[in-house]
């Protein structure tokens, strides 16, 4: 079974631009979560989608948004990029929201904002 | 709010030796799940081991085992017979049993296995 895939793997943008990142979960997985990883803040939860609905949201500004499609693929969008948005963005999928389900991570998209 | 603390930013161990990584967490919940994830350099995060809080028995996965002390809110990872491939950043993570799929991660411990 293929793992979680994320595209693109690397991105360079300039301040003020917007960016869209994509995540394809493991086949059959319906829950997709997004995390931001930076050296200073570590791993921080952005949001989680399940069956096309946002179920949880972390403490990030409204510039960060996401959505999930009927095939469980998810996208996250960051508008009006700031230098501090430079990070590794990780996507994780799991079969359901049941407590026992483990999250499986993708390789991440490394975003550099200049 | 849940917090996860890893007090050892860096550790090293000789190949074939045993090392223990520490993790403490703070929560008022009784139903939760704990995980250790491994993130090798420039590679994706993979699950090492998981523990359900309602289970008293410590989880083990081959060379990896945990020491789960619920009352002390401690969840350490022991790696036996360390191998070069164990070199990675290790993250301790907490998942509530009540708030869906949100994971709370510690800041990580960078482990280097020395040949």
Image (cartoon, coloured by chain):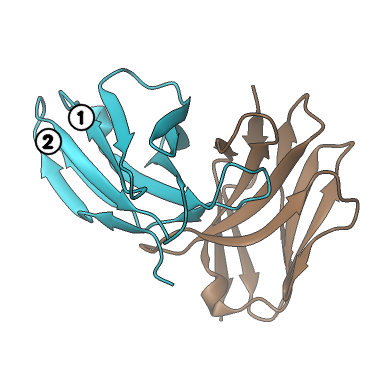
Q: Where does the N terminus of chain A fall, quadrant-wise?
A: bottom left
Question: Where is mark 1, residue-wise?
Answer: A83
Instruction: Classify A107 as above or below A23.
Output: below
Question: Where is mark 2, residue-wise?
Answer: A114
Residue at point 41%, 31% (across, down): A53
Residue B86 drawn at (x, y percent): 56, 71
Which residue reaches farthest front?
Answer: A70
Chain displayed in brown? B
Chain A drawn in what color?
Answer: cyan
| Element under disc 1 | helix
Q: Quadrant of residue A27?
A: bottom left
| Element under disc 2 | loop
Frontmost residue, A2 versus A113: A2
**Mark 1 or mark 2, earlier in chain:** 1
Q: Where does the C terminus of chain A fall, quadrant-wise?
A: top left
Q: Quadrant of residue B14?
A: bottom right
Frontmost residue, A114 versus B57: B57
Q: Is residue B6 visible?
A: no
Q: Is residue A98 left or right of residue B55?
A: left
Residue at point 44%, 49% (across, down): A92
Q: Is residue B6 left or right of residue A10?
A: right
Residue B72 drawn at (x, y percent): 86, 37
Residue B74 drawn at (x, y percent): 79, 42
Instruction: Classify B12 as above or below A8.
Output: below
Residues tagged 1 and 2 counted as in contact (Cβ below 8 A): yes
**Which chain letter matches label 1?**
A
Between the C-alphas of marks 1 and 2, the distance is 6 Å
Residue at point 72%, 74% (across, down): B63
Q: Is residue A58 left or right of residue A78?
A: right
Residue at point 25%, 47% (across, down): A22
């Amino acid at each position: 079974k293929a793992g979680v895939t994320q595209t693109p793997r690397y991105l360079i943008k300039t301040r003020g631009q917007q960016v869209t990142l994509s995540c394809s979960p493991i086949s059959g997985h319906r829950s997709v979560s997004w995390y931001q990883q930076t050296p200073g803040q570590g791993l921080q939860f952005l949001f989680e989608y399940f069956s096309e609905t946002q179920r949880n949201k972390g403490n990030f500004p409204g510039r960060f948004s996401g959505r999930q499609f009927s095939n469980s693929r998810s996208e996250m969008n960051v508008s009006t990029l700031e230098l501090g948005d430079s990070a590794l963005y990780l996507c994780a999928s799991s079969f359901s929201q049941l407590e026992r389900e483990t999250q499986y991570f993708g390789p991440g998209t490394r975003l550099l904002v200049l | 709010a849940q917090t996860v603390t890893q007090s050892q930013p860096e550790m090293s161990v000789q190949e074939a030796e045993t090392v223990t990584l520490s993790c403490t967490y703070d929560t008022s919940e009784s139903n939760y799940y704990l995980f250790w994830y491994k993130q090798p350099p420039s590679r994706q995060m993979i699950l090492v081991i998981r523990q359900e809080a309602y289970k008293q028995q410590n989880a083990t996965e081959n060379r990896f085992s945990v020491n789960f002390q619920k009352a002390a809110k401690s969840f350490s990872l022991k790696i036996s017979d360390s191998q070069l491939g164990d070199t990675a950043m290790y993250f301790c993570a907490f998942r509530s049993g009540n708030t869906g799929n949100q994971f709370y991660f510690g800041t990580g411990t960078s482990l280097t296995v020395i040949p």
